[in-house]
Amino acid sequence: MNYLQGILVAFKGAGVTLSITAVAVIIGVMLGLVIALMKLSNNKIMRGISSVYIDVLRGTPLLVQALIVYQGIPAILKSYGIQFTWDAMLAGMLVCGINSSAYVAEIIRSGIQAVDKGQTEAARSLGMSKSQTMRLIVIPQAVKVVIPALGNEFITLIKETAVLSVITIKDITRSSQLWSASTFLAWEAYIGTAVVYMILTIPLSKAMNLLERKLNTDAKS
């Protein structure tokens, strides 16, 4: 009975976890596309900025990034006499979205580079500009390549949002922590947490595997 209760308690935070993940993915894809295009640019400054951006975000833990944004930024602003506090949900969405953008940028970059260069050359020979070629020819084809990887990034983000419990967001993990603290049923609480994460991620993983196989089949036919 306690195990079932632990699962039900964890489920109370599932809506928060999925909401943060969905918004973070949108931020990550939009920002990641910009960073990927900067990384592929002929401009050395643009390439340098994108490389530093990716290295910093991929080289530091999401937990540390969350603490820097949620606690560090208000502390810095306070030292200049500016009173500012984050809404925890907003901070969590931004942190996860920015963190994800570094990984998405590399996914998109590899997808763009996977498109046959002959496609670009053919488009340019037809009089298309570089931006038109990228927008109308390269990116639509790259999307098919990167969809499975982006799906996996979504699944990874669902699990990584667990660290946001440290900034008081009542997600799956935080809900279980609070229940554990009030009932002293730590084992049941965190088994429930694990079960809920598996319920959310395993079906998505299977769906992404099916989608990847379908895309590969369509590409060969």
Image (cartoon, rainbow, N blue to C red):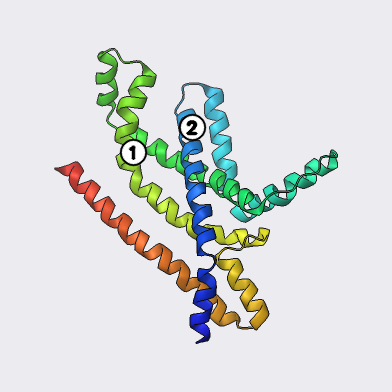
Q: Tag on residue 34?
A: 2
Q: Position of residue 52 (x, y in %)?
A: 58, 36
Residue 73 visible in the current orientation? yes
The number of discs equals 2
Q: Is residue 46 above or below residue 89?
A: above
* Pointer 1 or 2: first along the chain: 2
Q: Looking at the image, which is closer to me, 16 or 205?
A: 16
Q: Position of residue 33 (x, y in %)?
A: 45, 35
The residue sitting at 35% across, 43% down in the picture is 146
Residue identified by numbered label 1: 143
The residue sitting at 47% across, 47% down in the picture is 25
Q: Position of residue 204 (x, y in %)?
A: 36, 59
Q: Secondary structure at mark 1?
A: helix
How dense is the environment of label 1, judged by Cα within 10 Å: few (below 14), some, or many (20 and up)? Answer: some
The residue sitting at 34% across, 49% down in the picture is 148
Q: Looking at the image, which is closer to me, 185 or 89?
A: 89
Q: Is residue 20 left or right of residue 90?
A: left
How dense is the environment of label 2, judged by Cα within 10 Å: few (below 14), some, or many (20 and up)? Answer: some
Kindly identify the amino acid type of the residue bearing the numbered disc 1.
Val
Q: Tag on residue 10?
A: none
Residue 61 visible in the current orientation? no
The residue sitting at 70% across, 49% down in the picture is 86
Q: Looking at the image, which is closer to me, 195 or 116?
A: 195
Kindly identify the amino acid type of the residue bearing the numbered disc 2.
Val
Residue at the limit of the structure toward the left, as seen here = 221
Q: Is residue 120 above or below residue 152?
A: above
Q: Is residue 97 left or right of residue 153?
A: right
